[in-house]
Image (spheres, grey):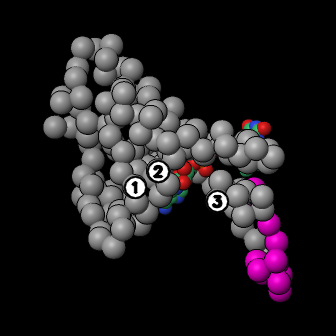
């Protein structure tokens, strides 16, 4: 079965996966005909733009609630390598390493905060770049 592999469940990844599911539906194909698989290191979509809010309860939305009803699969893991020659991606899932083959790859791993090497900065500063870091600040 052909697989569309989406790396990252941020805004871009979700948009791609949900758009692909809509198109699959429009052409009359089923989840058993074309697999759409999303990989993210977190089991939730983080609405990053809301990480500054006092109440963070709506800033992380479980992927199962978003993707299961539309037949989009999702895997919890850390993307470690992309082999474009072999069309496969290495993902660390728990303690194991898994390979996922793809027919189409959507690379939407986003961005992350980079701290300059100022002594003490990493240990003593806070940020709202991710849901986890926003919770830490909270
Ligand atoms: C506090 C804050 C406020 C913002 N306000 C605005 C605003 O008002 N307007 C605006 O336009 N933009 C705003 N932005 C920027 C906006 O949030 C980003 O541009 C947007 O989130 C980028 O979406 P993305 O899908 O490209 O990447 P991301 O949202 O970064 O998503 C990437 C996904 O990939 C996952 N991921 C990354 N690496 C790996 C890996 N190796 N393995 C597995 N998973 C991985 C991450 O967990 C994440 O889910 C704001 C950002 C922040 C932090």
Residue indicated by mark 2:
43
Going by the image, does 113 lie left or right of 80? right
Task: Give the mark nearest the N terminus, 1 or 3.
Answer: 1
Task: Give the mark nearest the N terminus, 2 or 1.
Answer: 2
Mark 1: which secondary structure? strand
Residue pictured at 36% horizontal, 26% vertical: 70
Across and down, in percent, residue 38 comes to: 39, 44
Which of the numbered marks, if any, corresponds to residue 132?
A: 3
Residue indicated by mark 1:
76
The stretch in magenta equals 117-128
* Residue 85 visible to the viewer: no
Query: Foreground residue, 7 or 66?
Result: 66
Crowding near pointer 3: few (<14 within 10 Å), some, many (20+)? some
Mark 2: which secondary structure? loop
* Main secondary structure along the magenta-highlighted residues: loop
Mark 3: which secondary structure? helix
Q: Is residue 108 above or below residue 2?
A: below
């Amino acid at each position: 079965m052909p697989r569309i592999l989406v790396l990252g469940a941020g805004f871009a990844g979700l948009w791609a996966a949900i758009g692909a599911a809509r198109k699959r539906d429009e052409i009359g194909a089923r989840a058993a005909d074309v697999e759409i698989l999303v990989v993210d290191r977190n089991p939730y979509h983080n609405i990053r733009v809301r990480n500054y809010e006092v109440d963070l309860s709506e800033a992380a939305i479980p992927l199962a609630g978003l993707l299961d009803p539309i037949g989009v699969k999702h895997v919890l893991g850390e993307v470690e390598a992309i082999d474009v020659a072999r069309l496969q991606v290495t993902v660390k899932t728990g303690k194991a390493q898994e390979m996922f083959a793809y027919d189409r790859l959507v690379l939407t791993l986003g961005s992350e905060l980079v701290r300059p090497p100022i002594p003490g900065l990493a240990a003593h500063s806070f940020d709202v770049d991710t849901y986890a870091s926003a919770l830490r600040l909270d």
